[in-house]
Image (cartoon, helix red, strand yellow):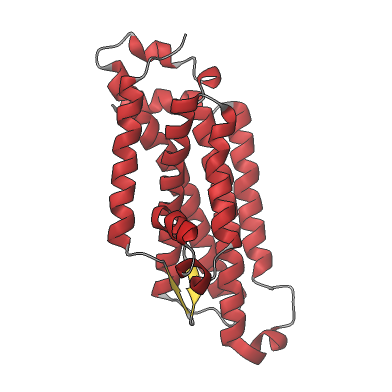
């Protein structure tokens, strides 16, 4: 399986892909650093530390979300769209090749998402601790970052499922649309009063800032069930469908 994952990375991370991901990671890092306001006068930052901390958290978590949704859409299209996945045929020549391919594909994509998310989370905290006078360690904020990564795992499954079912590059853009809908309607009262938004947020653990703390609309257990269900469904569809030559 490890060898299969390595082969998967060789196909997923082409030279163009590596350049693209490098640009995203550099942009993510620079965006977080500038969101700290390190270039402004320290005295101005000291006026209202709590307000500045909340603003920093909101700005940096949005930067992280935006970077990860771009990576998620890119990787799911790269990994599942038939016109970009001719290498699948190589794995079919091996015993249990299709099963190993399905599992290694999910693991490879999630590892890249997770590593970029981990880099973003560490950068947010280290930048806040060393470049600002107002940042404080906050478990709920740290948990919100973890939930963002989980959200992207789930959206990656959604994109993978749709691409496999429709085999259209445009179906891979659906996660981006769902992300946009969630972000444009991230007011808790509005979510609770709208049935359609509750459906969107029942699938996506998109953290929102409400009444002075970070939270999700449903519990983490709910989203873990969604994660497992969509992951299994993704595997089943891949195993049952024909791989095009």
Q: Quadrant of residue 40?
A: bottom right
User: Against 223, is 233 above or below?
Assistant: above
> Residue 9 placed where, x, y %?
45, 29
Q: Say which of 85 and 40 sits in front.
A: 85
> Residue 220 placed where, x, y %?
32, 61
In the displayed orientation, state which residue is furthest to the bottom. 47
Q: In which quarter of the image is residue 64?
A: bottom right
* Residue drawn at point x = 60 percent, y = 73 percent: 56
> Residue 17 placed where, x, y %?
59, 32
In the displayed orientation, state which residue is furthest to the right. 40
Work out whether residue 175 can be spotted.
yes
> Residue 26 placed where, x, y %?
64, 49
Question: Is residue 63 rendered to the left or right of residue 215?
Answer: right
Q: Say which of 131 and 37 sits in front.
A: 37
* Residue drawn at point x = 54 percent, y = 61 percent: 123
User: Against 182, is 8 above or below?
Assistant: above
Q: In which quarter of the image is residue 99?
A: top left
Q: Say which of 60 and 218 sits in front.
A: 218
* Residue drawn at point x = 41 percent, y = 46 percent: 154
* Residue drawn at point x = 30 percent, y = 58 percent: 222
Q: Which quarter of the rendered picture does the N terminus lie within?
A: top left
User: Against 184, is 128 above or below?
Assistant: below
**Across the whole image, how many numbered discs are drawn on residues?**
0
Work out whether residue 80 can be spotted.
no
């Amino acid at each position: 399986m490890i060898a299969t994952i390595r082969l998967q990375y060789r196909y997923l991370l082409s030279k163009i892909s590596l350049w693209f991901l490098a640009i995203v990671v550099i942009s993510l890092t620079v965006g977080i650093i500038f969101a700290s306001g390190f270039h402004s006068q320290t005295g101005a930052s000291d006026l209202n530390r709590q307000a500045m901390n909340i603003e920093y958290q909101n700005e940096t978590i949005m930067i992280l979300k935006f970077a990860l949704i771009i990576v998620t859409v890119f990787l799911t299209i790269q990994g599942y769209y038939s016109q970009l996945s001719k290498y699948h045929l190589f794995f079919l020549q091996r015993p249990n090749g299709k099963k190993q391919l399905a599992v290694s594909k999910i693991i490879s994509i999630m590892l890249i998402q997770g590593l970029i998310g981990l880099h973003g989370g560490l950068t947010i905290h280290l930048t806040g601790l060393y470049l600002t006078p107002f940042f404080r360690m906050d478990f709920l904020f740290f948990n919100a970052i973890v939930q963002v990564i989980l959200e992207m795992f789930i959206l990656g499954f959604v994109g993978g499922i749709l691409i496999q079912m429709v085999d259209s590059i445009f179906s891979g853009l659906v996660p981006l649309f769902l992300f946009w809908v969630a972000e444009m309607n991230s007011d808790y009262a509005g979510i609770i009063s709208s049935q359609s938004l509750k459906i969107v947020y029942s699938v996506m653990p998109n953290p929102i800032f409400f009444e002075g703390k970070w939270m999700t609309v449903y519990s983490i257990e709910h989203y873990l069930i969604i994660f497992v269900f969509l992951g299994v469904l993704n595997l089943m569809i891949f195993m049952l469908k024909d791989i095009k030559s």
